[in-house]
Image (cartoon, rainbow, N blue to C red):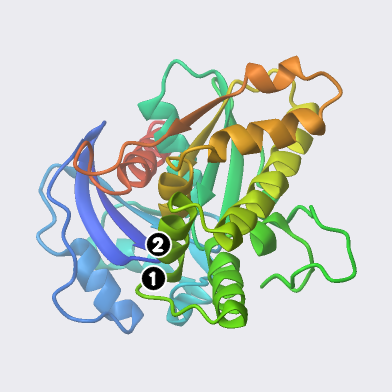
Protein backbone atom coordinates (compact mmCIF):
# COMPACT_ATOMS: atom_id res chain seq x y z
CA UNK A 1 0.00 0.00 0.00
CA UNK A 2 1.58 3.27 -1.14
CA UNK A 3 1.33 6.21 1.28
CA UNK A 4 2.48 9.79 0.56
CA UNK A 5 4.31 10.93 3.71
CA UNK A 6 5.22 14.51 4.62
CA UNK A 7 7.66 14.98 7.48
CA UNK A 8 7.48 18.36 9.23
CA UNK A 9 10.35 18.71 11.67
CA UNK A 10 13.31 20.73 12.81
CA UNK A 11 15.03 20.05 9.47
CA UNK A 12 12.11 21.59 7.55
CA UNK A 13 9.47 19.91 5.37
CA UNK A 14 10.16 16.83 3.24
CA UNK A 15 8.01 14.30 1.43
CA UNK A 16 8.38 10.78 0.08
CA UNK A 17 6.18 7.99 -1.20
CA UNK A 18 6.43 4.99 1.11
CA UNK A 19 5.41 1.38 0.66
CA UNK A 20 6.15 -0.76 3.71
CA UNK A 21 9.83 -0.15 4.48
CA UNK A 22 10.60 1.07 0.98
CA UNK A 23 11.06 4.85 0.79
CA UNK A 24 11.11 6.54 -2.60
CA UNK A 25 13.08 9.71 -3.37
CA UNK A 26 12.82 12.31 -0.60
CA UNK A 27 11.74 15.70 -1.99
CA UNK A 28 12.20 19.09 -0.33
CA UNK A 29 10.19 22.15 -1.45
CA UNK A 30 11.93 24.38 -3.97
CA UNK A 31 10.43 27.49 -2.37
CA UNK A 32 9.82 28.36 1.25
CA UNK A 33 6.48 27.20 2.61
CA UNK A 34 4.76 29.96 4.54
CA UNK A 35 1.05 29.04 4.68
CA UNK A 36 -1.35 26.10 4.74
CA UNK A 37 -2.19 26.37 1.04
CA UNK A 38 1.46 26.10 -0.05
CA UNK A 39 2.00 23.10 2.24
CA UNK A 40 -1.05 21.30 0.82
CA UNK A 41 0.13 21.95 -2.73
CA UNK A 42 3.57 20.57 -1.92
CA UNK A 43 2.11 17.56 -0.11
CA UNK A 44 -0.08 16.54 -3.03
CA UNK A 45 2.19 17.52 -5.93
CA UNK A 46 2.74 14.68 -8.46
CA UNK A 47 0.67 12.33 -6.31
CA UNK A 48 1.03 8.79 -7.74
CA UNK A 49 -2.22 7.19 -8.86
CA UNK A 50 -1.59 4.19 -6.55
CA UNK A 51 -1.45 6.41 -3.44
CA UNK A 52 -3.99 5.30 -0.83
CA UNK A 53 -3.56 8.13 1.70
CA UNK A 54 -1.53 11.19 2.66
CA UNK A 55 0.14 11.08 6.07
CA UNK A 56 1.90 13.88 7.97
CA UNK A 57 4.45 13.53 10.75
CA UNK A 58 4.61 16.72 12.81
CA UNK A 59 5.87 17.78 16.21
CA UNK A 60 3.25 19.21 18.53
CA UNK A 61 -0.18 18.44 19.89
CA UNK A 62 -2.46 16.69 17.37
CA UNK A 63 -6.16 15.94 17.81
CA UNK A 64 -8.26 13.39 15.87
CA UNK A 65 -5.41 12.87 13.35
CA UNK A 66 -6.41 16.23 11.89
CA UNK A 67 -6.24 19.35 14.05
CA UNK A 68 -2.78 20.72 14.84
CA UNK A 69 -3.37 22.36 18.20
CA UNK A 70 0.22 23.52 18.50
CA UNK A 71 3.19 23.12 16.17
CA UNK A 72 6.48 24.18 17.81
CA UNK A 73 8.32 24.09 14.47
CA UNK A 74 5.71 25.67 12.17
CA UNK A 75 3.47 28.05 14.10
CA UNK A 76 1.41 29.04 11.07
CA UNK A 77 -0.10 25.55 11.34
CA UNK A 78 -1.41 26.20 14.87
CA UNK A 79 -5.16 25.63 14.93
CA UNK A 80 -5.32 24.27 11.36
CA UNK A 81 -7.22 21.11 10.35
CA UNK A 82 -4.51 19.89 8.04
CA UNK A 83 -5.88 16.44 7.17
CA UNK A 84 -9.37 17.74 6.35
CA UNK A 85 -7.89 20.42 4.11
CA UNK A 86 -5.79 17.88 2.19
CA UNK A 87 -8.78 15.56 1.68
CA UNK A 88 -10.88 18.42 0.32
CA UNK A 89 -8.02 19.40 -2.00
CA UNK A 90 -7.17 16.00 -3.51
CA UNK A 91 -9.92 13.61 -2.39
CA UNK A 92 -7.51 11.21 -0.65
CA UNK A 93 -7.81 10.16 3.00
CA UNK A 94 -5.31 12.13 5.09
CA UNK A 95 -3.95 11.80 8.63
CA UNK A 96 -1.69 13.86 10.89
CA UNK A 97 0.44 12.07 13.49
CA UNK A 98 2.72 13.30 16.24
CA UNK A 99 6.36 12.93 15.19
CA UNK A 100 7.25 10.76 18.19
CA UNK A 101 4.37 8.43 17.30
CA UNK A 102 5.70 8.02 13.78
CA UNK A 103 9.33 7.67 14.86
CA UNK A 104 8.66 5.00 17.48
CA UNK A 105 6.26 3.10 15.20
CA UNK A 106 8.98 3.14 12.54
CA UNK A 107 11.53 1.92 15.10
CA UNK A 108 9.29 -1.09 15.77
CA UNK A 109 9.39 -1.88 12.05
CA UNK A 110 13.19 -1.53 11.92
CA UNK A 111 13.74 -3.62 15.08
CA UNK A 112 11.03 -6.32 14.90
CA UNK A 113 12.88 -8.52 17.41
CA UNK A 114 12.11 -6.06 20.22
CA UNK A 115 8.84 -6.74 22.05
CA UNK A 116 9.09 -3.84 24.53
CA UNK A 117 11.33 -0.80 24.14
CA UNK A 118 11.68 2.91 24.85
CA UNK A 119 11.92 5.00 21.70
CA UNK A 120 13.88 8.17 22.45
CA UNK A 121 14.71 11.24 20.40
CA UNK A 122 17.80 12.92 21.83
CA UNK A 123 18.45 16.04 19.80
CA UNK A 124 17.82 19.71 20.58
CA UNK A 125 15.22 18.40 23.04
CA UNK A 126 14.28 14.96 24.37
CA UNK A 127 11.11 13.04 23.49
CA UNK A 128 10.13 9.50 24.44
CA UNK A 129 7.46 6.85 23.96
CA UNK A 130 7.15 3.27 25.24
CA UNK A 131 6.29 0.67 22.61
CA UNK A 132 4.98 -2.84 23.26
CA UNK A 133 4.47 -5.31 20.43
CA UNK A 134 0.80 -6.13 19.98
CA UNK A 135 -0.27 -2.87 21.65
CA UNK A 136 1.74 -0.21 19.86
CA UNK A 137 2.67 2.95 21.73
CA UNK A 138 1.60 2.35 25.32
CA UNK A 139 0.73 5.96 26.11
CA UNK A 140 1.50 9.55 25.26
CA UNK A 141 4.22 10.96 27.48
CA UNK A 142 6.43 13.94 28.18
CA UNK A 143 9.37 11.97 29.52
CA UNK A 144 11.78 14.68 28.41
CA UNK A 145 10.37 16.84 31.19
CA UNK A 146 10.96 14.37 34.01
CA UNK A 147 12.94 16.16 36.73
CA UNK A 148 16.45 14.92 37.48
CA UNK A 149 17.86 18.00 39.25
CA UNK A 150 15.95 19.22 42.29
CA UNK A 151 18.48 21.82 43.41
CA UNK A 152 17.45 25.50 43.64
CA UNK A 153 19.98 26.28 40.90
CA UNK A 154 18.65 23.72 38.41
CA UNK A 155 18.64 24.86 34.80
CA UNK A 156 15.43 26.39 33.45
CA UNK A 157 13.73 24.33 30.75
CA UNK A 158 11.78 25.65 27.80
CA UNK A 159 8.67 24.08 29.33
CA UNK A 160 8.92 26.51 32.25
CA UNK A 161 10.10 24.02 34.88
CA UNK A 162 13.60 23.63 36.27
CA UNK A 163 15.78 20.54 36.32
CA UNK A 164 14.11 18.53 33.52
CA UNK A 165 16.29 15.96 31.79
CA UNK A 166 15.85 18.07 28.63
CA UNK A 167 17.19 21.13 30.46
CA UNK A 168 20.22 19.16 31.65
CA UNK A 169 20.99 16.90 28.68
CA UNK A 170 19.16 18.32 25.64
CA UNK A 171 21.10 19.76 22.73
CA UNK A 172 19.91 23.35 23.18
CA UNK A 173 20.75 23.39 26.88
CA UNK A 174 24.14 21.81 26.15
CA UNK A 175 24.92 24.58 23.65
CA UNK A 176 24.14 27.15 26.35
CA UNK A 177 26.36 25.28 28.81
CA UNK A 178 29.24 25.10 26.32
CA UNK A 179 28.99 28.84 25.60
CA UNK A 180 29.04 29.70 29.33
CA UNK A 181 31.91 27.31 30.14
CA UNK A 182 34.12 28.48 27.26
CA UNK A 183 33.45 32.17 27.90
CA UNK A 184 34.43 31.70 31.55
CA UNK A 185 37.64 29.93 30.52
CA UNK A 186 38.41 32.36 27.69
CA UNK A 187 38.15 29.65 25.05
CA UNK A 188 37.07 30.61 21.52
CA UNK A 189 34.45 28.20 20.14
CA UNK A 190 34.88 27.34 16.46
CA UNK A 191 31.90 25.96 14.57
CA UNK A 192 28.91 24.23 16.14
CA UNK A 193 29.18 24.31 19.99
CA UNK A 194 28.14 20.65 20.35
CA UNK A 195 30.71 19.53 17.77
CA UNK A 196 33.30 21.69 19.55
CA UNK A 197 32.34 19.96 22.82
CA UNK A 198 32.81 16.54 21.22
CA UNK A 199 36.29 17.45 19.94
CA UNK A 200 37.30 18.87 23.33
CA UNK A 201 35.99 15.75 25.08
CA UNK A 202 38.00 13.48 22.78
CA UNK A 203 41.07 15.65 23.42
CA UNK A 204 40.60 15.09 27.15
CA UNK A 205 39.84 18.73 28.05
CA UNK A 206 38.69 18.86 31.67
CA UNK A 207 35.77 21.24 31.11
CA UNK A 208 34.35 19.07 28.29
CA UNK A 209 34.73 15.91 30.37
CA UNK A 210 32.84 17.60 33.21
CA UNK A 211 30.01 18.72 30.90
CA UNK A 212 29.54 15.23 29.48
CA UNK A 213 29.96 13.73 32.94
CA UNK A 214 26.98 15.73 34.21
CA UNK A 215 24.93 14.77 31.16
CA UNK A 216 25.72 11.09 31.62
CA UNK A 217 24.79 11.12 35.31
CA UNK A 218 21.48 12.85 34.61
CA UNK A 219 20.60 10.50 31.74
CA UNK A 220 21.43 7.51 33.92
CA UNK A 221 19.12 8.76 36.68
CA UNK A 222 16.38 9.34 34.12
CA UNK A 223 16.67 5.88 32.53
CA UNK A 224 16.89 4.17 35.91
CA UNK A 225 13.58 5.76 36.91
CA UNK A 226 11.91 4.55 33.70
CA UNK A 227 13.39 1.06 34.07
CA UNK A 228 12.17 0.66 37.66
CA UNK A 229 8.61 1.28 36.44
CA UNK A 230 9.10 -1.13 33.48
CA UNK A 231 11.30 -4.00 34.58
CA UNK A 232 10.72 -6.01 31.39
CA UNK A 233 11.98 -3.16 29.20
CA UNK A 234 14.42 -4.63 26.66
CA UNK A 235 16.04 -1.66 24.98
CA UNK A 236 16.31 2.05 24.37
CA UNK A 237 16.18 2.82 20.65
CA UNK A 238 17.83 6.21 20.12
CA UNK A 239 17.44 8.71 17.30
CA UNK A 240 18.49 12.34 17.01
CA UNK A 241 21.71 14.20 16.25
CA UNK A 242 22.85 14.41 19.87
CA UNK A 243 22.34 10.69 20.47
CA UNK A 244 24.09 9.72 17.24
CA UNK A 245 27.18 11.71 18.28
CA UNK A 246 27.27 11.38 22.07
CA UNK A 247 26.67 7.64 22.27
CA UNK A 248 29.51 7.00 19.84
CA UNK A 249 32.02 8.90 21.99
CA UNK A 250 34.27 6.62 24.06
CA UNK A 251 33.01 6.18 27.60
CA UNK A 252 29.65 7.98 27.35
CA UNK A 253 27.41 4.91 27.24
CA UNK A 254 29.49 3.34 30.01
CA UNK A 255 29.08 6.48 32.14
CA UNK A 256 25.31 6.48 31.60
CA UNK A 257 25.15 2.82 32.58
CA UNK A 258 27.26 3.41 35.69
CA UNK A 259 24.85 6.16 36.76
CA UNK A 260 21.92 3.80 36.14
CA UNK A 261 23.44 1.15 38.42
CA UNK A 262 23.94 3.73 41.15
CA UNK A 263 20.21 4.48 41.09
CA UNK A 264 18.79 0.97 40.73
CA UNK A 265 17.83 -1.33 43.59
CA UNK A 266 19.10 -4.28 41.54
CA UNK A 267 22.21 -3.55 39.47
CA UNK A 268 21.52 -6.48 37.11
CA UNK A 269 18.52 -4.64 35.67
CA UNK A 270 20.90 -2.24 33.90
CA UNK A 271 22.77 -5.08 32.18
CA UNK A 272 19.70 -6.43 30.39
CA UNK A 273 18.81 -3.03 28.87
CA UNK A 274 20.43 -2.70 25.44
CA UNK A 275 21.05 0.53 23.53
CA UNK A 276 20.25 0.69 19.81
CA UNK A 277 20.75 3.53 17.33
CA UNK A 278 18.43 3.96 14.35
CA UNK A 279 20.20 3.55 11.00
CA UNK A 280 21.57 6.81 9.67
CA UNK A 281 22.87 7.77 6.21
CA UNK A 282 24.48 6.32 4.20
CA UNK A 283 22.99 3.10 5.59
CA UNK A 284 19.43 4.48 5.41
CA UNK A 285 17.56 7.63 4.43
CA UNK A 286 17.72 10.28 7.13
CA UNK A 287 14.73 9.92 9.52
CA UNK A 288 13.66 6.74 7.72
CA UNK A 289 11.87 5.58 10.87
CA UNK A 290 9.55 8.62 10.76
CA UNK A 291 8.60 8.05 7.12
CA UNK A 292 8.06 4.33 7.70
CA UNK A 293 6.13 4.94 10.92
CA UNK A 294 3.76 7.49 9.36
CA UNK A 295 3.01 5.11 6.49
CA UNK A 296 2.44 2.22 8.91
CA UNK A 297 0.05 4.24 11.09
CA UNK A 298 -1.90 5.45 8.05
CA UNK A 299 -2.12 1.92 6.67
CA UNK A 300 -3.40 0.63 10.02
CA UNK A 301 -6.17 3.27 10.09
CA UNK A 302 -7.18 2.49 6.50
CA UNK A 303 -7.46 -1.20 7.41
CA UNK A 304 -9.73 -0.60 10.44
Residue 154 visible in the current orientation: yes
Q: Looking at the rendered structure, which numbered label has been put on residue 192?
A: 1
The residue drawn where x is 78% and y is 37% is 225
Compared across the picture, whether 11 is left or right of 223 comes to left
Image quadrant in which you'd find residue 112:
top left
Position above or below: 179 against 112:
below
Q: How many marks?
A: 2
The residue drawn where x is 79% and y is 69% is 161
In front of the other: 215 or 56: 215
Q: CA distance from mark 1 to mark 2?
A: 5 Å
**How many neighbours does mark 1 have within 10 angstroms: few (below 14), some (14-19), or many (20 or more)?**
few
Image quadrant in which you'd find residue 94:
bottom left
Q: Which residue is mark 2?
A: 195
Residue 97 visible in the current orientation: no
Horizontal and vertical percent position of residue 203: 44, 53
The residue drawn where x is 54% and y is 82% is 186
Compared across the picture, whether 302 is left or right of 104 comes to left
Image quadrant in which you'd find residue 160:
bottom right
In front of the other: 141 or 82: 141
In front of the other: 301 or 270: 270
The residue drawn where x is 19% and y is 47% is 17
Label 2: which secondary element = helix
In front of the other: 223 or 15: 223
- In what quadrant of the picture does the C terminus appear? top left
Kindly check if marks 1 and 2 are in contact, taking CB atoms under 8 A apart as contact.
yes
Horizontal and vertical percent position of residue 265: 86, 23
Horizontal and vertical percent position of residue 98: 50, 54
Amino acid sequence: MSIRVIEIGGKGVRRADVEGKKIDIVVVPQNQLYCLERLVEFATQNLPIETKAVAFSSAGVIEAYDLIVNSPNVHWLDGERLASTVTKYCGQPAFVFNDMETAVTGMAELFPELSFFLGATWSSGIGERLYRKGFGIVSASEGGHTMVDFSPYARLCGCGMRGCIEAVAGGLSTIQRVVMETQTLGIVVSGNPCSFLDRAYQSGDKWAREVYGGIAVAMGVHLATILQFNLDLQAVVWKGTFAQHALRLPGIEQAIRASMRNHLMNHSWEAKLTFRLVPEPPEAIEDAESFIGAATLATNLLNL
